[in-house]
Amino acid sequence: MARLKRWGREIALLLLMLAGILFAMDLWRAPQAPPAFDSQRLTTLDGATLSLAQRSQERPLLVYFWASWCGVCRYTTPSVAKLAQQGGNVLSVALRSGDDQQLAAWLAAKRLSLPVVNDPAGELAARWQVGVTPTFVIIDKGKVVQSTTGWTSYWGMKLRLWWAAW
């Protein structure tokens, strides 16, 4: 029994250290919102024009920076698309993934449907100082309230949006 308790403590300590390291990495790699980002007009692949401030007024907005060539994004993009199809407030930004037609063809081939702003030269990502794909940014009422990088689950995204609204 004492041995089991010791193992439990060791595992709990390891998990706590891992959580601390992941939190520190997220802080270090966190994107920086450019000045007046909330009033910038963005155009999606389907021709809709919007602003991040406008999209985040009623409920938190998940902005997902990804790329068609990103290995981790192959696992996260379907989850973001599922969240968008279920009515989640989502906007994705495709980094250096080709022109609009190439990106639309890639999305169609993968059977993914989500609002996408194409960033073929990476200029929007550079203004946000996004250095890692995927990057998830949550904006509420025009202000960045959370961000994380790397893999996250569908439920992790839902939990982050719920937490931002709460």
Image: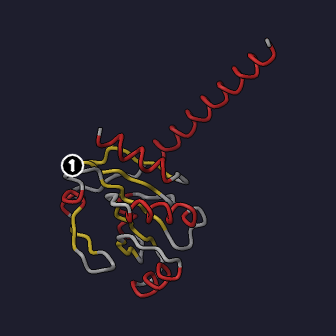
Give the side of residue 52 with respect to residue 162, left or right.
left
Q: Residue furthest bottom?
A: 101
Count of numbered labels shown in the rendering: 1
Residue that numbered label 1 is attached to: 141
Q: Residue furthest front?
A: 86
Q: From what the image shows, is residue 110 above or below residue 1?
A: below
Q: Which percent across, then down, holds residue 125?
A: 39, 64
Q: Quadrant of the C terminus?
A: top left
Q: Which percent across, then down, holds residue 155?
A: 48, 49
Q: Quadrant of the N terminus?
A: top right
Give the side of residue 116 with respect to residue 5, left or right.
left
Tell which of 105 and 81 is nearer to you.
Answer: 81
Quadrant of residue 71 within the rendered picture: bottom right
Quadrant of residue 34 within the rendered picture: bottom left
- Which residue lies at the image location 32% right of the left edge and 44% below the top edge? 145
Q: Which percent across, then down, holds residue 147?
A: 41, 48
- Which residue lies at the image location 69% right of the left edge and 20% below the top edge? 9
Tell which of 110 and 32 is nearer to you.
Answer: 110
- Which residue lies at the image location 47% right of the left edge and 85% below the top edge? 105
Q: From what the image shows, is residue 48 above or below residue 17?
A: below
Disc 1 element: loop
- Which residue lies at the image location 21% right of the left edge and 64% below the top edge? 51
Give the side of residue 116 with respect to residue 134, left or right.
left
Q: How dense is the environment of label 1, judged by Cα within 10 Å: few (below 14), some, or many (20 and up)? A: some
Q: Which percent across, then down, holds residue 82?
A: 44, 63
Q: How is the image coloured?
A: secondary structure
Q: Could you tell me the amino acid type at mark 1?
A: Lys
